[in-house]
Image (tube, grey):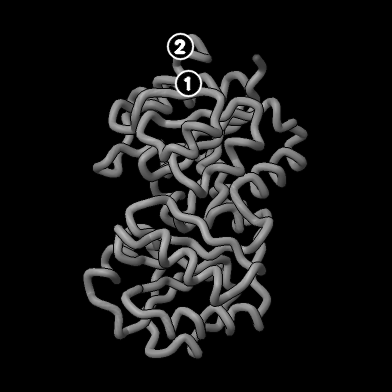
Amino acid sequence: MTIKLVATDMDATFLDDTKHFDNERFKQISQYMTDNGIYFVSASGNQYYQLKNFFKDYPKTLFVAENGAFVASHSEIFQAWHFPDDLVTRILKVLAETSNIQYVVCGQKSAYVLESAPQRFFETTSFYFPRTKKVSSTEEIDDKILKFSVNCPVTETEKYMQLLQNGIGDEVSIVTSGHGDIDIIQTDINKATGLNYLGEKLNIKPEEMCAFGDGGNDLEMLSFVGHGVAMDNASPIVLKTAPYKTVDNNQQGVLHHLEEIFNI
């Protein structure tokens, strides 16, 4: 098996439940990949600037951020796909009319949270989106919008996914990474889109890629690559979709699997 690119989701996949990874083990794996011309990609629903911070000691890391809408290296933005302005307006109207949710408007320059949102929500958002601004109204936002991140009651995630899909329509895809977190993303733009872009840019075929994931927003990526790996803690549909499985995120399943396939 020839692997030329490794992509991994972050939360509950590459990171353990305390939002850390085994740096010493990854340092060895990273050196092996560098020595053998294998690219490493952080593929996440989170903001580019957060992902850069996780891999500040690994300057060759590539990024597929915002669930595939933003592709970059540490020093260069390669590609960004954003929502049309009229669709942004419609989505914001639906969000404003939906009760018991909080939401983040994820732009290319920054993320945006309403000043009326609870302070705890703003603090949590600032971890995943280090560049976050408070706005009194979404009309203040002057940015290209990449996605919308919605938080709802955990036990009602499926209900709110359907509510949002019905309200907005088929021009968007509604996905979840679990824990009451829902992403509204552009139809046909997902993590596989970002990997396809990098594959064409780097002359790497999908069958030469390996990817790791745990949630519904990883499904397209895991199906796209030749070596898709589900975490042991993944959702049932991910476990069913991915042909390979590794131990859970708290046991550093990504690193465990890479050590096995690279014989490190």
Q: Residue at x 45, y 20 (%)?
A: 257
Quarter of the image for the C terminus: give it. Answer: top left
Q: Which callout, 2 or 1, points to the residue nearer the camera?
A: 1
SS assignment at label 1: helix
- On screen, residue 24 versus residue 246, left or right, reads left
Nearer the observer, 237 or 261: 237
Determine which residue is flagged by label 2: 264
Where does residue 98 sit, x and y in percent of width and height?
A: 41, 80
Nearer the observer, 17 or 142: 17
Where does residue 216 sit, x and y in percent of width and height?
A: 49, 47
Pointer 2: residues within 10 angstroms few (<14), some, or many (20+)? few
Q: Residue at x 42, y 51 (%)?
A: 177
Under mark 1, the amino acid is: Leu
Q: Residue at x 46, y 79 (%)?
A: 95
Under mark 2, the amino acid is: Ile
Determine which residue is flagged by label 1: 258
- On screen, residue 234 versus residue 147, left or right, reads left
Is the Cβ of the residue at disc 2 closer than 8 Å to that at disc 1?
A: yes
Q: Quadrant of residue 82?
A: bottom right
Where does residue 79 sit, x and y in percent of width and height?
A: 68, 57
Q: Residue at x 34, y 65 (%)?
A: 125
